[in-house]
Amino acid sequence: MASGQDLLWLLGVVLLMDASARPANHSSARERAGNREEREILPPDHLNGVKLEMDGHLNRDFHQEVFLGKDTGGFEEDAEPHKSRRKLMVIFSKVDVNTDGRVSAKEMQRWIMEKTAEHFQEAVAESKVHFRAVDPDGDGHVSWDEYKVKFLVSKGHNEKEVAKKIRDEEELRLDEETQEVLENLRDRWYQADSPPPDLLLTEEEFLSFLHPEHSRGMLKFMVKEIVRDLDQDGDKQLSLPEFISLPVGTVENQQGQDMDDGWVRDRKKEFEELIDANRDGVVTADELEDYMDPMNEYNALNEAKQMIAIADENQNQHLEPEEVLKYSEFFTGSKLMDYARNVHEEF
């Protein structure tokens, strides 16, 4: 076990050592960035700090999001390795509240909750900006028609023409895909509209529309949508085969087969170890809702234990500095394996 003095020594080594290898950072989070205007209009498919995407896929960046919070700078592909190592050790020292040179499950749980709260605050700030973008008259309410105009403009339609047709209740000629998206958005709009429904969303309701994790009612709606999409026998719950069923598409090569094998393996593990709370082989909507609730402290503790188990090579139920460095890709998306081996030898 590393003592507090050992941790300070290791931090010093981190600052002094240099390595030629650059970290190979996953780019999945960056690849999600799309057109700015459309992102202001559409609810995001990806929700930071939430285990599942809106389409039911696993959030591949979840562990990095709840370990790094919104401060992900310093672990990009072009980041200087010694700076990435230094930042990782600084984060470790913050998680290690009692400064004993190792991180317990309780300490990691507290950290996960803190970083999740950061994502919540960031979502609130972004939603305020997006609300102003869709509230042209600044009256503090957004009508469904106002939103629909902005959405169709983001799809290339003429704003004046669309607004006139909606005002005059004329038929809008839309392609099938756009019409389907619009209908789904309207359903979501209704759900976010607190009783009594008036199809006008306040700033708080608009936040729930964009980020269902901020509202218990909208989280239930999100779960209902996911169950509906994955439920093959219509019993409104998910069996393991339903949850791990492969996404639509044909496996055409070995790379695709490997990807599908990984999909099945990861989802099976998540289903059996975390989602199916009573271990009866099926996941109910309530179980899925509890699993997806980012502010569920019990889930945060389970996640903390799982994250520790991934890197806990000495099996002492704690994380130590050299373990975090060795498994840095899991925590940050950056590989520092060679460096971790060198530090271990020195340590």
Image: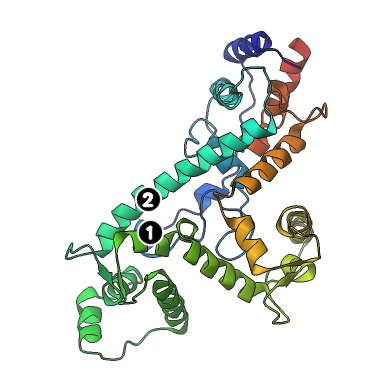
Where is 238 relative to 131, above or below? below
Q: Amino acid at mark 1?
A: Leu
Q: Residues within 10 Å of mark 2 (few under 14, many from 20)?
A: some
Tell whether 23 sits left or right of 211.
Answer: right
Q: Amino acid at mark 2?
A: Val
Instruction: Name the residue that disc number 2 marks.
Output: 124
Earlier sequence position, callout 2 versus callout 1: 2
Camera sees residue 217:
yes
Res 58 → quadrant: bottom right
Quadrant in which the C terminus is drawn: top right
Instruction: Name the residue that disc number 1 marks.
Output: 207
Where is 291 relative to 120, above or below? below
Residue 320 or 57: which is nearer the viewer? 320
Res 15 → quadrant: top right
Residue 23 position in % (x across, y down)? 62, 32
For the point 67% across and 73% down, which residue is it? Answer: 230
Of helix, strand and loop, which one carries label 1? helix
Residue 282 or 211: which is nearer the viewer? 282
Please say if the residues under marks 2 and 1 sit with CB atoms less than 8 Å apart: yes
Residue 341 position in % (x across, y down)? 75, 21
Where is 69 relative to 17, above or below? below
Residue 125 position in % (x across, y down)? 34, 48
Camera sees residue 250:
no
